[in-house]
Amino acid sequence: MINTDVAVPTDETAGAVPRRRAVSLLHFAERYALVGLLIAVAVFFTLLPASSEVFPTPANLRILAAGQSVTLLIALAALIPLVAGQFDFSAGAVAAASSVTMAGMMAHHDAPLWACVVAALALGLAVGLVNGIAVSVFGMNSFVITLAVATLLGGGIQWYTQGRTISNNISPALIDFGSLTWAGIPRVLLVVTSATLVIYYLLDQTPYGRSLRAIGDNPGAARLVGMPVARYGVIAFAAGGVLAALAGLVLTARIGGATADNGTSMIFPALAAVFLGATAIQPGRFNLFGTVVGVALVAVSVSGLTLAGAADWVNPVFNGAALAIAVAISTYLARRSRRM
């Protein structure tokens, strides 16, 4: 007897497999396009005659990795509040203020290293708590209040330093930590790696991290289901403040002191990296691994341009353009993901 129930492929089902493959390829391209761009930029400056002699050398790569440790820590500091849907423009100023606090205590008060570290981290925690309470408890605009705090800290730095660098009586142990290596790996990189792994665990492997993402996606719905939105927001800003202070500690170790910089020059490359990261790995969402790739892309591009002999104005123009493009793309991807 002949079985007449065998399904005969139609034009619609026959075209389903190619469509699924096309969609899968599109998702893969969205997730890893930034990684491909990073590889392409690195290959370009490796082959470019103006930078090929220095760019791919192990020494330059070590300098590049160690030099971007501060940027990555500030980017992570900004990332945590951004996951909760809030801006923190004070991260660069907190890093600068923590650096000045450490160097000032050593230079002017002969304080031991451990006390300077504790004071710097305590400053970051205090600023983070102030930001978190102002935004999450009192409902102030995060953009405005953190920008105000950054301006206030910048003025305090100028007042304390009188516009001068603090470089005397800095702990040799701290300087060694910032300049030496372990098994060819810069010591500061080990601290940055540890901090990155902790933040990865916090954001991706804990109920707090998942709740923070839910708050960032829809704070109203998070309140309705009973999430402690205000408390989690305060914790996010406090954690960001501590990370920014840790960046200040690494900065002091790297340069052997503290400058009168108000931190503005550090926050914009970090923000560019965070928003670039939102276009990769988890497109449309702020995520840690995308941020790491974003920091690497900004660092490799700026290093290559510098070695190629680019003019001084090229680096800030690049950072600004990268930030603008990243914001536009990440906003588009976020809106599209909500519609899907």
Image: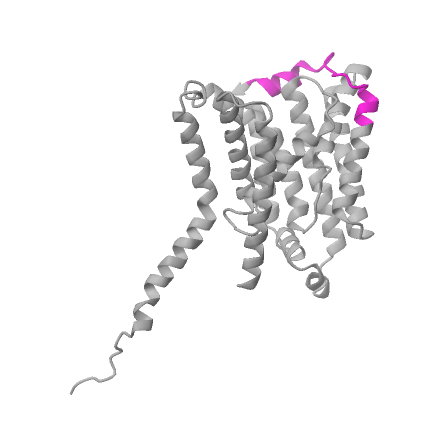
Q: How is the image coloured?
A: one colour
Task: Examine the image and state in which quarter residue 11 appears.
Answer: bottom left
Q: Is residue 178 left or right of residue 154?
A: left
Residue 141: percent from the left, percent from the top?
A: 77, 49
Q: Which residue is outermost to the left?
A: 1
Q: Is residue 177 left or right of residue 306?
A: right
Report the residue at 58% width, 57% height from top.
335
Q: Is residue 284 above or below residue 54?
A: below
Q: Which residue is outermost to the bottom?
A: 1
Q: Which residues are magenta?
A: 156-180
Q: Which residue is outermost to the top?
A: 168
Q: Is residue 72 above or below residue 16?
A: above
**Residue 23: in magenta span:** no
> Where does the N terminus fall, quadrant-wise?
bottom left
Q: Is residue 29 left or right of residue 81?
A: left
Q: Is residue 161 above or below residue 15?
A: above
Count of all numbered marks drawn on residues in the image: 0
Q: Nearer the viewer, residue 246 or 35?
A: 35
Q: Nearer the viewer, residue 123 or 96?
A: 96
Report the residue at 74% width, 20% height from top.
103
Residue 180: percent from the left, percent from the top?
A: 56, 17
Residue 209: percent from the left, percent from the top?
A: 63, 51
Q: Does residue 126 show up? A: no
Report the residue at 77% width, 15% height from top.
107
Residue 173: percent from the left, percent from the top?
A: 65, 16
Report the residue at 58% width, 18% height from top.
179
Q: Does residue 96 show up? A: yes
Q: Nearer the viewer, residue 43 or 48?
A: 48
Q: Nearer the viewer, residue 54 or 332?
A: 332
Task: Examine the image and state in which quarter residue 312 appears.
Answer: top right
Task: Examine the image and state in which quarter residue 73 appears.
Answer: top right
